[in-house]
Image (tube, rainbow, N blue to C red):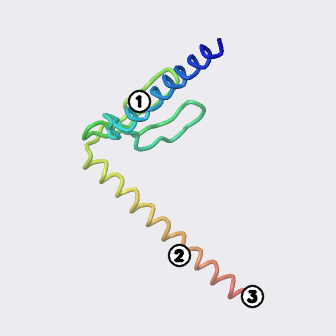
């Protein structure tokens, strides 16, 4: 009787082991580059936001809610790259302006002492 239980446990362990090995192999062989790639998501509240999704050579800007999905804009890779660069340039300019103002404030503070 105990031999029967031992055989049952070993057979079950073997089947579970085979399932794990096959699962690991299949997961390893899956392509990392799928059809879609989420480039970014900005939350605008609970379960609401704006997402940038790349599909093929196009970048889609989508509005996402629990009940709806709206397409705001479609761009090619080149347009999205230019848009991104303009944002970085603008951010760099703003950061530079803030840095200059901080320097002036520190100089003014030092002259008041």
Secondary structure at badge 2 equals helix
Residues under numbered marks 1 and 2 in contact, where contact means CB atoms less than 8 Å apart: no
CA distance separating discs 3 and 2 = 20 Å
User: Which residue, given by chain and number where applicable, does mark 2 sit on?
Assistant: 100
Seen from this angle, which residue lies furthest top? Answer: 1
Picture residue at 63% right of the left edge, 84% below the top? 107
Q: Position of residue 74 (x, y in %)?
A: 30, 37
Picture residue at 43% right of the left edge, 30% below the top? 23
Q: Earlier in the sequence, mark 3 or mark 2?
A: 2
Q: Position of residue 17 (x, y in %)?
A: 49, 29
Which of the numbered marks, if any, corresponds to residue 11? none
Secondary structure at badge 3 equals loop
Question: How many numbered marks does the figure carry?
Answer: 3
User: Which residue, given by chain and number where applicable, does mark 1 sit on?
Assistant: 22
Crowding near pointer 3: few (<14 within 10 Å), some, many (20+)?
A: few
110 to 96, vertically: above or below: below
> In the rendered view of the protein, which quadrant contains the C terminus?
bottom right
Residues under numbered marks 3 and 2 in contact, where contact means CB atoms less than 8 Å apart: no
23 to 42, vertically: above or below: above
Q: Quadrant of residue 37?
A: top left
Q: Position of residue 63 (x, y in %)?
A: 44, 32
User: Which residue, given by chain and number where applicable, does mark 3 sit on?
Assistant: 113
Image position of 78 (left or right of 83): left
Crowding near pointer 1: few (<14 within 10 Å), some, many (20+)?
A: few
Q: Quadrant of residue 2?
A: top right
Picture residue at 51% right of the left edge, 35% below the top? 49
């Amino acid at each position: 009787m105990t031999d029967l239980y031992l055989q049952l446990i070993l057979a079950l362990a073997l089947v579970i082991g085979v399932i794990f090995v096959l699962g690991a192999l299949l997961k390893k062989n899956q392509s990392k580059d799928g059809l879609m790639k989420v480039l970014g998501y900005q939350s605008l509240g609970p379960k609401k936001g704006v997402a940038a999704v790349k599909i093929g050579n196009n970048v889609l800007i989508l509005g996402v809610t629990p009940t709806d999905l709206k397409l705001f804009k479609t761009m090619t890779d080149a347009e999205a790259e230019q848009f991104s660069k303009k944002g970085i340039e603008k951010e760099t300019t703003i950061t530079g302006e803030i840095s200059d103002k901080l320097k002036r404030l520190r100089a003014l503070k030092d002259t008041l002492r």
